């Protein structure tokens, strides 16, 4: 399961998530989405490095990022 999912159609390319990510894993795409913006993206390789800290989602004004965390087992 991915640690974060970015809804590229909802993203307006403000780049706040790229600044918020402490590991610098999120970048803006080179391809324009249907809304005419360069959406935020994360590669499969960088997704594996993601810690699910959720700072990117907290910074996103368009609520375009969902964060998934593993449940801790007792």
Image: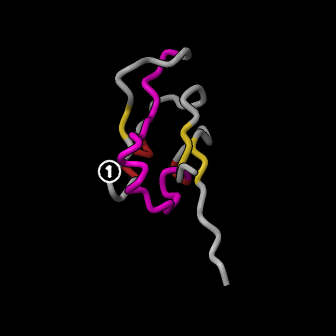
Tell whether position 31 is magenta. no
Tell me if residue 61 can be seen.
Answer: no
Examine the rendered structure and indicate whether residue 60 appears above or below residue 3: above
The C terminus, quarter of image: bottom right
Tell whether position 44 is magenta. yes
Identify which residue, 1 or 31, lies in the foreground: 1
Examine the rendered structure and indicate whether residue 12 appears above or below residue 27: above
Tell me if residue 73 can be seen.
Answer: yes
Examine the rendered structure and indicate whether residue 51 appears above or below residue 32: below
**Crowd around label 1: few <14 · some 14–19 · many ≥20 (10 Å):** few
Q: Quadrant of residue 73?
A: bottom right
Q: Which residue lies furthest to the left in this view?
A: 24
Is residue 15 toward the left or the right of residue 74 in the image?
left
Is residue 4 toward the left or the right of residue 14 in the image?
right
- Image spot of residue 14 (x, y percent): 45, 34
Q: Which residue lies furthest to the bottom in this view?
A: 74
Q: Residue at x 35, y 23 (%)?
A: 30
Write the start and end of the magenta stretch as one range.
36-57
Identify which residue, 44 or 26, lies in the foreground: 44
- Count the numbered circles shown: 1
Q: Residue at x 51, y 28 (%)?
A: 12
What residue sits right under mark 1 in the picture? 24
- Image spot of residue 44 (x, y percent): 41, 42
Q: Residue at x 54, y 44 (%)?
A: 60
| Colouring of the image | secondary structure
For mark 1, give the secondary structure.
loop
- Image spot of residue 62 (x, y percent): 60, 38
- Image spot of residue 23 (x, y percent): 33, 57
């Amino acid at each position: 399961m991915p640690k974060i999912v970015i809804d590229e159609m909802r993203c307006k390319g403000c780049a706040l998530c790229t600044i918020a990510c402490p590991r610098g894993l999120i970048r803006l795409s080179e391809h324009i989405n249907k809304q005419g913006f360069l959406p935020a993206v994360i590669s499969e390789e960088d997704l594996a490095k993601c810690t699910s800290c959720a700072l990117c989602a907290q910074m996103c004004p368009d609520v375009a990022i969902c964060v998934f965390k593993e449940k801790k087992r007792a």
